Image (cartoon, rainbow, N blue to C red):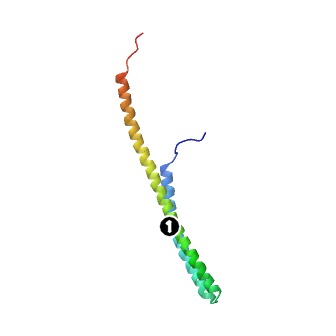
């Protein structure tokens, strides 16, 4: 039967999230580069059919890549947030369980008595 608990290494997830988010600028740079290349090709084509085809492709393609950059940034940022939530929950639960356990242990020692034979 599969485990019924969440097993996460918050540090690894946080690092992965920051690394993922940092690639969004690479996506934006790539989109700008391709935008320039397609515009240059459209200008050089000087053809009434080819030039508009490049421009149509550019109008469809570039917003998708820009959207990809935003999504990559959001994915990375959300992964970092999730890792922080898990780390904080671990810390809070450890404190709560340790305090409760210590209090319960103290009560049990007060309530216990030797059994006479």
Q: Is residue 92 above or below residue 47?
A: above
Q: Is residue 114 above or below residue 103?
A: above
Q: Is residue 101 left or right of residue 1?
A: left
- Relative depth, front residue between 12 and 94: 94
Identified at 54% across, 67% down, the residue is: 68
Q: Is residue 104 left or right of residue 41?
A: left
Q: Quadrant of the C terminus?
A: top left
Label 1: which residue? 70
Report if residue 26 is visible in the image. no
Q: Position of residue 114 (x, y in %)?
A: 39, 16
Report if residue 69 is visible in the image. yes
Identified at 50% across, 53% down, the residue is: 13
**Marker count (numbered):** 1
**Local SS, label 1:** helix
Identified at 50% across, 67% down, the residue is: 70
Q: Is residue 103 above or below residue 36?
A: above
What crowding class fits label 1: few (fewer than 14 Cα within 10 Å), some (14-19), or many (20 or more)?
A: some
| Residue 51 image-quadrant placement | bottom right
| Residue 98 image-quadrant placement | top left
Q: Position of residue 57 (x, y in %)?
A: 60, 78
Identified at 38% across, 40% down, the residue is: 95
Return the residue found at the far left: 110
Q: Quadrant of the N terminus?
A: top right
Q: Position of residue 59 (x, y in %)?
A: 56, 78
């Amino acid at each position: 039967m599969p485990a019924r608990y969440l097993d996460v290494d918050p540090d690894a997830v946080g690092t992965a999230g920051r690394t993922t988010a940092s690639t969004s600028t690479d996506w934006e740079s790539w989109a700008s580069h391709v935008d320039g290349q397609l515009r240059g090709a459209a200008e050089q084509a000087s053809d009434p059919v080819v030039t508009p085809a490049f421009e149509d492709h550019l109008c469809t393609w570039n917003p998708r890549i820009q959207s990809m950059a935003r999504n990559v940034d959001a994915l990375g940022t959300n992964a970092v947030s999730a890792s922080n939530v898990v780390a904080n929950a671990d810390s809070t639960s450890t404190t709560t369980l340790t305090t409760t356990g210590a209090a319960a242990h103290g009560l049990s020692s007060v309530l216990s008595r030797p059994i006479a034979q």
